[in-house]
Amino acid sequence: MRKKLQEKGLTEVLVDSAGVDDYAGQPRDHKMSSYARKEKYDLGGESKFISQDQVDSADLIVCMEKYHVVEIQKRLPYKHWGRIKLFNEICFSKQTNLIDPSGNTEYIYGITFQHIEEGCGTLARKLYKMLREGEIFF
């Protein structure tokens, strides 16, 4: 996706991942990291806590659970709450939480991983269209 964006002159997309609970420096979930490696993704080694600077400067904050939305809302003025979207809402038009696979079977990790991968593809297409055509979808 990055190469396609660059070919179109769209290089101003930065994606980062961080949590709303301060587990910074803790190892990432072993099962999810292992599953991701099988699928040729590298999640990195440690979790990160979302900084206030990241919250303040983000154009879009995608949250996996409604709890995450509430935690981010506490850190942003009301007029900026439109930047916060639930993953399933923005990717699948559903007001539901992403399944948290923690402590579950590898099968649940696999389903969750596939759902995230599909949703990220949808989100990338939406962002590309928005940046290319100026269409606002959130």
Image (cartoon, rainbow, N blue to C red):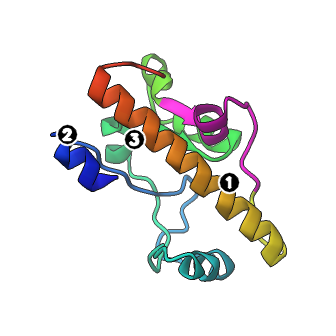
* Tag 2–tag 3 contact (CB < 8 Å): no
Question: What separation in Å lies between label 1 and label 3 (alpha carbons)?
Answer: 25 Å
Left or right placement of residue 54 versus residue 3 in this view? right
Question: What separation in Å lies between label 2 and label 3 (alpha carbons)?
Answer: 28 Å
Asked whether 61 or 125 is in front, the reply is 125
Left or right placement of residue 43 versus residue 96 in this view? left
Is there any visible trace of residue 60 in the rendered image?
A: no
At label 3, counting other C-alpha atoms closer than 10 Å, the crowd grade (few under 14, some 14-19, many 20 or more) is some
Q: Which one is closest to the eye, mark 1 or mark 3?
A: 1
Point 64% across, 32% down: residue: 89
Q: Which of marks 2 and 3 is nearer the N terminus?
A: 2
The residue that mark 3 highlights is 55
Mark 1 residue element: helix
Q: Which one is closest to the eye, mark 2 or mark 3?
A: 2
Residue 131 percent across, percent down from the top left = 30, 30
Point 76% across, 37% down: residue: 96
The residue that mark 2 highlights is 8
The residue that mark 1 highlights is 115
Left or right placement of residue 102 versus residue 87 in this view? right
Question: What separation in Å lies between label 1 and label 2 (alpha carbons)?
Answer: 28 Å
Point 37% across, 29% down: residue: 129
The amino acid sitting under disc 1 is His
Is there any visible trace of residue 14 in the rendered image?
A: yes
Asked whether 51 or 37 is in front, the reply is 37
Q: Earlier in the sequence, mark 1 or mark 2?
A: 2
Residue 8 percent across, percent down from the top left = 19, 40
The amino acid sitting under disc 2 is Lys
Question: Residues in magenta?
Answer: 84-99
Q: Is residue 10 above or below residue 113?
A: above
Q: Which of marks 1 and 3 is nearer the N terminus?
A: 3
Q: In this view, does 21 lie above or below 5?
A: below
Residue 94 percent across, percent down from the top left = 72, 31
